[in-house]
Amino acid sequence: MYSHILIPVAFDGDHPTKPAEEIAHILSAPGARVTFLHVMEELPAYAVNYIPEGYDKETRAAIEAALEGKAGNFAKGEAQVIKGHAGRSILDWAEDHGVDLIVISSHQPGLSDYFLGSTAARVVRHAKCAVHVLR
């Protein structure tokens, strides 16, 4: 059983969180913390001028609200939104906060994944804790 479970959440429509939540309920020790984490990628400098003012703040608030809703399904659920590169940020956050299990969704790899690698693959290769991958 695990005492701090991290569920990275991508709001791309391809990775529903319900299966990850079910796994977290099964694998969590009594009193375990479950953290839902979303990593907001930094906008490229050339795109910043085309984004409406306040968009970043509104988007972050909407994401935080969605994550809080998911975290509310756990006694010690919490929501975190951070900025950075998804794979690296998930790994750093997990190590810095004593996570002992990451439950991450994956997808069928495409050609670009073989050259660039997916977020889930990076997490599996470099995590210093257990990783449960959902497909």
Image (tube, grey):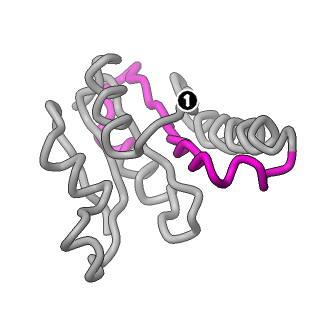
Q: Is residue 55 magenta?
A: no
Horizontal and vertical percent position of residue 76 = 51, 22
In the depicted view, which residue is nearer to us: 8 or 17?
8
The three-letter amino acid code for the residue at tag 1 is Gln
Q: Is residue 47 left or right of residue 85?
A: right
Residue at figure coordinates x 68%, y 43% from the top left: 63
Residue at figure coordinates x 33%, y 64% from the top left: 106
The residue singled out by tag 1 in the image is 80
- Quadrant placement of the C terminus: bottom left
Q: Is residue 126 left or right of residue 52?
A: left
Horizontal and vertical percent position of residue 65 = 74, 38
The magenta segment: 24-52
Q: Give the residue furthest to the front.
A: 46
Q: Is residue 42 magenta?
A: yes
In the depicted view, which residue is nearer to us: 45 or 114?
45
Quadrant hosting residue 11 = bottom right
- Quadrant placement of the N terminus: top left
In the depicted view, which residue is nearer to us: 93 or 100?
93
Residue at figure coordinates x 86%, y 41% from the top left: 53
